[in-house]
Image: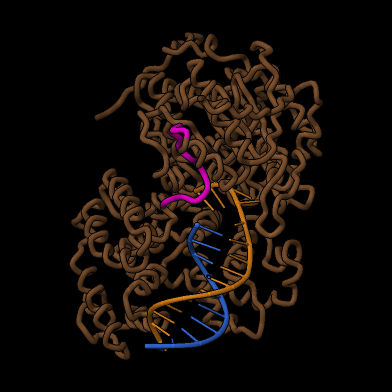
Chain colours: A brown, B orange, C blue
Amino acid sequence: MATFTIRRAAGEARSFRIDYRGELNDAQYEAATALEGPVLVVAGAGSGKTRTLVYRVARMVETGIPARSIVLLTFTRRAAQEMLRRAGALVGGGAEEVVGGTFHSFANTMLRRYARVFGWPEVFSILDRSDSEDAIGLARTRLGLDRRDRRFPRKQTLASIFSAAVNRGLTVADVVESEYPNLAEDVPDVERCRDAYVDYKRQRNLLDYDDLLLDFRDRLREIPEFAERLRGVFRHLMVDEYQDTNHLQADITELLAGPRGNVMAVGDDAQSIYGFRGADFRNIMSFPERFPGTRVVTLEENYRSTQAILDVGNAVIAAARERYTKTLFTRRVAGDRPQLVPAPDERLQSLFVTQRILGIAEEGVPLSEIAVLFRSSFHSFDLELELARAGVPFVKRGGFRFIETAHVKDVLAHLRVLENPRDAISWHRILLLQEGVGPRAAEAVIDWLSSPDGSLRGLGTPGAVAGLRGAASAAVARLGAFLSSLDASSMRPPALVARVVDEYRPTLERVHRDDAPKRMRDLEQFAILAERYQALGRFLADMALEPPVDAVGDTMAIDAPEGESLVLSTIHSAKGLEWHSVFVIGLADGRFPSAWTVDEDEIEEERRLLYVACTRARENLILTWPATAWDRSLGTIPQRPSRLLDAVPHQLLEPVTLVEEEEEEAAP
DNA sequence: CTTCTCCCTGTTTTT
DNA sequence: CAGGGAGAAG
């Protein structure tokens, strides 16, 4: 069908359904309506950053820009989905086709989508951190670097070194020199190990998290047709949380934007908290240099917090070594001063927090509007016990996730070999689960599988793999027969999970004798997750890249109506969120900042982290610290309040002293 | 070779 | 607090 485009008469005001001028402040309006060219939005905490992005997407859709030509890169898929939902609601639909997700998931999708066109591997598995550590461990063994007479870094350390090198654009030698000076003389071996790891992944079609970004960046850079093609499809790019991007992500942004430069970066240098992952908040400062002609918009009016809370946040960040570009203000009420509560010990901290939460809830604040934030996941262990005792329902975000537990990973490994039979890491994992099979036998089977006569189906024939002993041979044949009976292309993920769990149950009961029932419940959860998926590949990629956010341990949580649970979260996982009342616990030196924090850059990051925590609160902010801590070798040791609080003038905080109730006389 | 047991480590934060 | 590593036994 031919189309004929009627031009608007000159000077005719375009009519939009949405009153952008009326619903946004001046700075937000400018950001939401500048649709061409590079734009940098420096958005303070609570300044309506998400709102601005939502209205910008709506504006684009209303302007007639096809939604599928827009990419919105955010820190989590949930964030992207939420924004697109809101934008869609504003314009009455049409935003669903915006491509949204993380850099990793976008890279994953593009590498797969264009694999056939450019001759890249069409099937690959994604290694999570522990998978990649396992692969590195195998490489280390193979190189004979694990002999006892010689100390050599453990696989976790090696993984950290390799990852830091990739994410910061350094050589292995650079990283060792700056962070592991004690390993200086091992550099050549560490490099050999890295090379072996890289080869191994290549041969087996395996990509770790870093490879997703690295390969995507390199291909965009080295294959001009690829970059051209993507720029033709995706004409408008938005990147949220730009302060937490690393150099690879900045490169990708630049390559996707191309000379046209229709790119908006949104972020806040004061909230950069992923330096440990290679993020460099200076990215945001150098954005205008990378994109000449950048229009810079600063959002400084805070709509979230009371002035009293903001004062504390501003005081925390004012002490930062580097100058920041803005100071937040609000027109909201002054509000009560945030409280600073020293507790004699952790137990009393937990009691105080629990009782105070119940008090706030009694005033009519829903539990889901209250959050407890902490530096490290384990800081909430004691509180979790107390909450359970008091019958307060909660969900926990951050920390060890159930997708990372041994039993869930075991089931995943079965699914992964179905998808990618060359995934030796997963083979290794499931083979070791078989009775009678150790590292040696597993190796033999994997070698056989990758040899000319090896095949999944052949594995089901007893004796196919030479050199296995009776028990091992039978177990391997059984495994082969089982896996051959599954057809990943015709069966849907929930059915596959169900079959694998059935097969795996006896193993689970053997290996985890004491807590098998609890682990089985996790697997039932896992089966439910699979129901949303049609294809195995997509399911596996999502489990690696965007796993469910809830941490393990909520089996302890009391069942609560949807949305009626208190939130416990690491500060990292609280990014971008807000609550009516926020508790920050464990504000003692050694916990927050953590004891590992030594150099100044790290202290600065801890400072930004506390800033993020404080600015999550709308009405109430309560800071607590335990005056003593229990150490199993040292016993009770005194704690000092966090040095990060030194920067906060005393008059900004209301000190609270905890007094224990007198024990009541026994009734006669 | 595999399995079992015991001990030790070491426990940020996440894609 | 558990997961990994080392050492001994089957």
Left or right: residue A215 compared with residue A17: right
Stretch in magenta: A390-402
Single out the residue that lies furthest toward the bottom: A467
Residue A266 highlighted magenta (yes or no): no
**Residue A344 spot, x, y in % from top left:** 69, 37
**Residue A402 spot, x, y in % from top left:** 42, 51
**Residue A545 spot, x, y in % from top left:** 44, 50
Taking the spot 51% from the left edge, 15% from the top edge, the residue there is: A363
Residues A76 and A652: in front is: A652
Left or right: residue A662 compared with residue A79: right
Residue A43 visible to the viewer: no
Residue A195 visible to the viewer: yes
Single out the residue that lies furthest toward the front: A668
Image height of A299 relative to A381, above or below: above
Residues A141 and A647: in front is: A647
Left or right: residue A76 compared with residue A378: left
Taking the spot 66% from the left edge, 36% from the top edge, the residue there is: A271
Image height of A662 relative to A251, above or below: above
**Within the image, what quadrant is residue A331 found in?**
top right
Image height of A641 relative to A491, above or below: above
Image height of A187 relative to A281, above or below: below
**Within the image, what quadrant is residue A94 found in?**
top left
Image quadrant in which the N terminus of chain A is located: top left
Q: How many marks?
A: 0
Taking the spot 37% from the left edge, 17% from the top edge, the residue there is: A6
**Within the image, what quadrant is residue A508 found in?**
bottom left
Left or right: residue A272 compared with residue A127: right
Taking the spot 75% from the left edge, 44% from the top edge, the residue there is: A639
**Residue A511 spot, x, y in % from top left:** 36, 68
